[in-house]
Amino acid sequence: MIEPLVLLPGMMCDARLFGPQIAEMSADTPVMVAPVSRGERIEEIASDLLDCLPKRFALAGLSMGGIVAMELLRRAPDRITRIALMDTNPLAEIPAVAANREPQIVRVRSGRLEEVMREEMKPSYLAPGPHRAEVLELVMDMARALGPNVFIRQSRALQRRKDQQATLRKIKVPTLVLCGAEDALCPVKRHEFMAELIPYATLRVIEGAGHLPTLEQPDAVTDALRDWMGQPFVLR
């Protein structure tokens, strides 16, 4: 029996980030998207999610969703049958980036969320291609729907996040480490580093994609997720 698949979106994103994968995989896999928008600490978000997620499940997170996924695995390794970490970062926030979030929070509080988001989600974070503008506009739509309070909570959570390298070293379930080949925010080298930390991890680099490969190259990501879901669960 295929276990349920839980998807965790990135900062200021909702289920639409995984729209193509949900459409393809939900025919034969129970799929749910869990929000990462409640709480001002990664630990708080993870604790809240564990109260409402299935007893056992496969887990995939992109960007901030991957950060929350690592914390879920740290807290409840017995409940997660496999994990996919996509375009994400296991390291604690560096002080310069954490400090830069403060003026952003001030501007968002003053009603300038869209301005901050357009600066934050730079076109260069996505691979060049005919759909880049369309993907960026969808990102803006998701951010507008979630609103300024979510931006502030998520910014605080990212500022305070902990290093998860020790968590990665302890993973004993089938693991997919995936990223866009042109991701400038969470580059390929960081994912190679993550895959080296995790015993028996599979690394997939998606050509023609940047930070949001689920939307930029949806078929390639869906294929990678299907391969990962098909790996036998063996506790090593």
Image: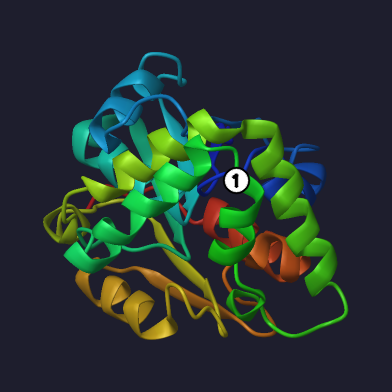
Colour scheme shown: rainbow
In the rendered view, would you say 176 is above or below 27? below
What is the quadrant of residue 198 in the picture?
bottom left
Instruction: Residue at 53% x, 78% y: name it.
Output: 183
Q: Amino acid at mark 1?
A: Arg
Q: Is residue 91 left or right of residue 14?
A: left
Question: Residue 176, how many percent across, how many down?
Answer: 44, 63
In depth, the one of 148 and 231 nearer the eye is 148
Question: Residue 181, how many percent across, how many down?
Answer: 56, 84
Instruction: Residue at 24% x, 52% y: name it.
Output: 172
In the rendered view, would you say 168 is above or below 71? below
Badge 1, how many Cα within 10 Å: few under 14, some, many 20+? some
Q: Is residue 11 left or right of residue 156?
A: right
Q: Is residue 111 left or right of residue 128?
A: left
In depth, the one of 101 and 204 nearer the eye is 101
In the rendered view, would you say 29 is above or below 171? above
